[in-house]
Image (tube, rainbow, N blue to C red):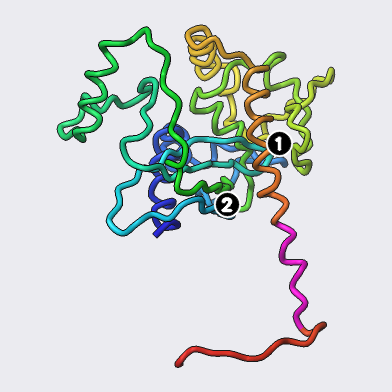
Amino acid sequence: TYFSDLDVTRSHLVSALMHVAIRELHKKPSLIIGPDGNPAKGKWGIMLGGVHCSFKREILPYEKYEMWTRLLAWDRKWLYVVTHFVKAGTAYPDGWTLDDPADWNFVPRFLRTKRRARKARVAAPPPDVPEGVVFASAISKYVMKVGRLTVHPEAVLDMCDLLPPKPGGWNTMDGKKEEVVEDMEGLEEMGGEESVLSLLGIPNGSANGHANGAAKEAAAVTGWDWKMVEAENARGMEYAKHHAALDSLSETFTGNKQPALGYYTDIF
C-alpha cells in the first residue's frame, strides 16, 4: 500500500500549500497568460510525473506508522515532494504552522501526551530522531498545467504567498521557458525591460501586488529571504536531480534489438 498511501499524503500537502492557486485557477484558468500573450485555454491540473520509493525496514502487519511529507525542491517544470514512512510516536514536530492537533475534536493520545511533556521543557533542545524509525523514503514529482501550457512551479508558489520577494522583481528575470534549472542558481536577472510574466505562467497583475505584500510580511516574520530559499532548493535538488535523471531510463529498453530469455504469462 506504499504508493496508495503516497497518493493520499501528497494530496494533503498540495491542498494545504496551494489551495489559493487551486481555487483561483480552477475558477478562471485564463489568469495564466501564455507565451503568445493570450490567456491560457483549458483546465488547470496537477499531474504526477513519477515516484521512487526506497525501502529501509519492513513494516510489520498491523504496525502503526506515520507519513511525513514536505516540499523538497522545484525546477522550471517539476515540483518535487519527499515523504518518509516513520514509526508512529517516534518523531514530533517542533511546532505547527497551520493546524495544531490541539484544535482537533479527536487528538491521538500520543500527541496529547507529547504536547503536555514539551510544555514543561520548552527551553530543552529537541531530541534527535532515534535510528531505525524510518521505514521508507519516497520522492515524487508533479507538473502543473493549464491545458497544454506548463505552469512554472515558482509562479504557483508565489501566487500562494509561499515565497519571499525576489530581488529585482519578477519583471527582471530570465524567461527561457525551455531551459530546466540544473545548477539551482535560480532564474538569472537581466537588465532588459522584457516582461516574462507570461513565459513563467504568472497570473497577470499579481506579481507585485497583494502576493508580494504578503510575501514581504511573511519574510519579516520568518527571517527567510530569496537567497535562503535558493540555498534550500539547491540542497533538495541534490536528491531530486537523481530522480529526474531516471526520465531517460526508457532508453535502456532493447525491444527487438536483443534476444529475450523467454515468454512467460500468468494463468490468463
Residue at the image point whose x is 41% and y is 37% from the top: 23
- Which mark is drawn over residue 65? none
The N terminus appears in which quarter of the rendering? bottom left
Where residue 57 sits in the image (x, y, percent)? 46, 52
Above or below — where is 256 with respect to 199? below
| Quarter of image, res 50 | bottom right
Query: In the drawing, does residue 232 fall left or right of residue 30?
Result: right
Magenta residues (range): 247-255
| Quarter of image, res 16 | top left
* Amino acid at dot 1: Leu
Query: In the drawing, does residue 232 fall left or right of residue 84?
Result: right
Residue occupying the far left of the picture: 105
Q: In what element is the residue under mark 2? A: loop
* Amino acid at dot 2: Gly
In whole angstroms, how far apart are the C-alphas of marks 1 and 2?
15 Å
Q: Residues within 10 Å of mark 2 (few under 14, many from 20)?
A: some
Residue beneath disc 2: 147
Of residues 214 and 51, the one nearer the viewer is 51
Above or below — where is 210 with respect to 233? above
- Which mark is drawn over residue 199? 1
Where residue 142 sits in the image (x, y, percent)? 56, 47
Where residue 119 sits in the image (x, y, percent)? 26, 13
Query: In the drawing, does residue 76 fall left or right of residue 55?
Result: right
Q: In what element is the residue under mark 1? A: helix
Where residue 28 sits in the image (x, y, percent)? 47, 40
